[in-house]
Image: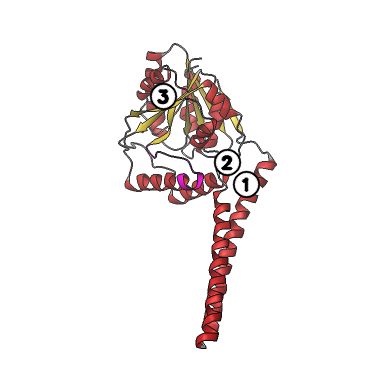
Amino acid sequence: MEISVISPIYGCRESIQELYEKVTFTLQKICSSYEIIFVNDNCPQNSWEVVSHIAKNDKNVKAIKLSRNFGQHYAITAGIDHCSGNYVVVMDCDLQDKPQEIEKLYKKALEGYDIVHGRRVQRQDSFFKSFSSKLFYKTLEYFTDTEHDYTIGNFGVYSKKVIEAIKGLKEKSRDFLLLVKIVGFKKTEIDVEHDARAYGESSYTLSKMINLAIDSIISHSNKPLKLIIQLGLLVSVLSFFVAVGLTIAHYTYGFSVEGWTSLMVSMFFLFGILFGILGTIGLYIGKIFDQVKNRPLYIVDEIIN
């Protein structure tokens, strides 16, 4: 198998047939053996009906139905675990990633690159999606001490050894791009065209983006714990200097801090910091708890082909 194309399916039922036809047309031009893997992530629009119909009529299409909604990156993981291509293409199902760009990415990979990302120079997204995406990656950059380009998404070509390396990573928190960064290998980026969303709406709401950011940061960085230590030291140093200053003011000028208000404000301030620290530590403990349970990353309900 030369090329495997993996596309997680959630929403965008109307785009699936067109996606299949365009991907098939492109792959038939550039290689003789290929497979298209559609992973239905329990789509509420009953996209499985469309996906299963396509797979039953084309043996080059593998349809995987998950038992419930696990999330985009878990659906990608399911596709990776069931692919067999020398090169693997990961792309969304909404046709914003243009299937004809696969040829350009594949030819670049044949030059000796293990990872070829598609750089969406002119993203055709709404203001909210573009802004939230930039904010998401800037936050990741700060907390994980890595560089992230918001114009680069999952769309790209990955060699078999990259995919095999990713299969060996068993983190319960999955972010495909971060996993690609972890495994390394020779990589590059090329410009690709990006289309406006023609079907459906993005399932990534602001709350989901925030949760994904927190999940990714806690799973891939201990920087929040270091910041907590620095904050604790800063508060302690400031408290010491304030105490020294008040003592000097009391004996020199007869000044003293009186009243219930100042006491309560300082108490609430410190308790707020303490609860924030305990919450952050609790998130890390929760991640450890999820990992040691060793539950499967996803559960497959049905596979065709």
Marks 2 and 3 sit apart, C-alpha to C-alpha, by 29 Å
**Which three-letter amino acid code belongs to the residue tagged 1?**
Lys
Whether residue 231 appears in this view of the structure is yes
Q: Nearer the viewer, residue 120 or 43?
A: 120
Residue 274 vertical position relative to residue 226 in the rendered view, above or below: below
Residue at the outermost bottom position: 254
Residue 258 vertical position relative to residue 232 in the rendered view, above or below: below
Region rendered in magenta: 141-151
Q: Quadrant of residue 89?
A: top left
Q: Earlier in the sequence, mark 3 or mark 1?
A: 3
Marks 3 and 1 sit apart, C-alpha to C-alpha, by 37 Å
The stretch drawn in magenta includes residue 146: yes
**Which three-letter amino acid code belongs to the residue tagged 3?**
Tyr
Please state which of the two labelled residues, at mark 2 or mark 3, is closer to the viewer: 2
Residue denoted by label 3? 20
Residue denoted by label 2? 173
Q: Nearer the viewer, residue 141 or 54?
A: 141
